[in-house]
Image: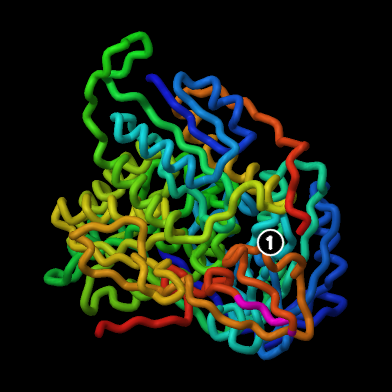
Amino acid sequence: MTLALFSNNPLCAIMCGQTESGQYTTGSALDILRIARDAIHKGWRLLNHPLYGNYRPYQQPFRTLLLEAPFSFSQSSSASVPAQIDVDSLQFIEEALLIFTQTRCIHPEDAPKKLYEDCAEIDFALIRHTLENAGIEIVRGELPFHQHFSTQ
Amino acid sequence: MNLELHKITVQKITFGSATQIDNGTLVVNKDELEALLLEDTRLEAVNFEIALPGEKTRIMPVKDAIEPRCKIEGEGEVFPGFIGPVETVGCGKTLVLEGMSVLTTGRLVAPQEGIVDMSGPGADYTPFSQTCNLVAVLTPKADIKLHEQEATCRIAGLKTANYLASKCKESKADKVETYAYPTFTEIAQAHPGLPKVAYIYMLQSQGLLHDTYVYGIDAKKILPTLISPTEVMDGAIVSGNCVSACDKNNTYVHQNNPIIKTLYDRHGKDLNFVGVVITNENVTLADKQRSSSYAVKLAKMIGAEAAVISEEGFGNPDADLVLNCVKAEKLGIKTVLVTDEFAGADGASQSLADSCQEGTAVVTAGNANMTIILPPMDKVIGDDADADVIAGGFFGSKRPDGSLEVELQAILGATNELGFNKIGAYTI
């Protein structure tokens, strides 16, 4: 199984690098949804639901998505091989994008320190079961102590 | 399986020297109870407060609500896997202190929610403004991991509820309710001509602060299974769900599941209540497919011709609700879905994250995005610091006059998806 872990949660950063096509960004949750959407358009398949967690976009700044490569994917192949789009993945990501684009979102940079830390922890906990099922070794990243948090 | 609920009505709570029920007043030995809870060395501090209907009191953030119960006769003890051993419950006699709730509070994480106002406009939206509440303000030790802090608070609430009921075991009940759940052979042959209706009971199971436990097992790890409704009444299902106050199923709500109650009320009259299938709402998509297929298969196996399906939560669980609906309808099981909505402040946005053509019979518990102004209260139990970071808004906000502008999402039980709430619906 070729995997990609996309996340803006620093606690997941190391694991992003350990998947074949993963990406860690310091951007927003919406950025992660868009990165995943682009991969889905190329045939990648979601392994976790993008709307996990019962916090709204203005409460939870982090989003972590695990995707599986299309069967035709090959790192060493220079030719692009068309892949079937997974319709379920497409539907889930588009539904998530609809909610995130219509709702106020909190960027990690705007989160007060306690909120930042707690939300990172919760996000890390909620993705864990999916990662373990996919055989990913759970490795915890570090919170960025140099982050300039909101003074609230 | 036959269960009698021996219900004692609590009309007031006071603190006193010995825990007992006295003519409708529950007297609580606060020191004894606090000492019991502090046997758990993971707790730094605990304090108890009382909040009665009509008082100008706000309780926040509420983690769980639990109705005091204990076994009088029968195997095991309530809350099996936590208080009781893992023996099967749901038979015999169970004492219930009705009219009251244990509420646990204490801030574990910044975005943690759950408001109960005992009076004012907010009281109209939570059922717990009508119960006499014994509030446990809990402070777990700071140096233990977050999941341990949550477990500590969860178990403290269950211990409190069981302690209170146990101290009243010798008291006479005000009323006794009897519930029977016969064998499948008897169920299949009973009430010919009446539609066979099952209940597919979705349990929150996404992870930390979003969990439910069945006989002490994390629901994330189970395959869907059958459970007797009487086991549910004996606390076989316990909440570890601390987020989205409006639609989380507190332990109290599981104990008093109104869908189960209503199916029992109508059993033998216009339907044949054939059974309960519990299922989960995992984050992993393969789990969703497995659980929805399995749950629907079980409903079919017990002969269901129709099923009531209740969701817990929103967003990700909407996908489970849709999968359960589509797969049930495909097997010829007519469905009624019970859910709430996140339709925006004006109610104009799509209510659910997912949908299906088969979902033609849906009962709504209300729109969680509706906003409300909560006036200042004379007393706050718990922690109202940083109202902005409590979910619902980041909460909405604290206004200069001290009032809170919040979404219904922040009010405990406001849009509960078992119908244990005060918002009704009608078809227009």
The answer to whether B43 is drawn above or below residue B407 in the figure is above
Nearest the viewer among A51 and B98 is A51
Nearest the viewer among B340 and B67 is B340
* Quadrant occupied by the C terminus of chain A: bottom right
Check the image and tell me how it is coloured.
Answer: rainbow
Residue B369, magenta (yes or no): no
Residue B404, magenta (yes or no): yes
Nearest the viewer among B233 and B42 is B42
Residue B301 in picture, x, y percent from top left? 22, 49
Residue A147 in picture, x, y percent from top left? 73, 40
Residue marked by disc 1: B157
Residue drawn at 68 percent across, 61 percent down: B157
Few, some or many residues within 10 Å of mark 1 (<14, 14–19, 20+): many
Q: Is residue B343 left or right of residue B378?
A: left
Residue stretch rendered in magenta on the structure: B401-405
Q: Secondary structure at mark 1?
A: helix
Asked if one can make out residue B49 in the rendered structure from this viewpoint, the answer is: yes
Q: Is residue B401 left or right of residue B254?
A: right
Nearest the viewer among B58 and B196 is B58
Residue drawn at 27 percent across, 48 percent down: B298
In which chain is the residue bearing label 1? B
Q: Amino acid at mark 1?
A: Gly
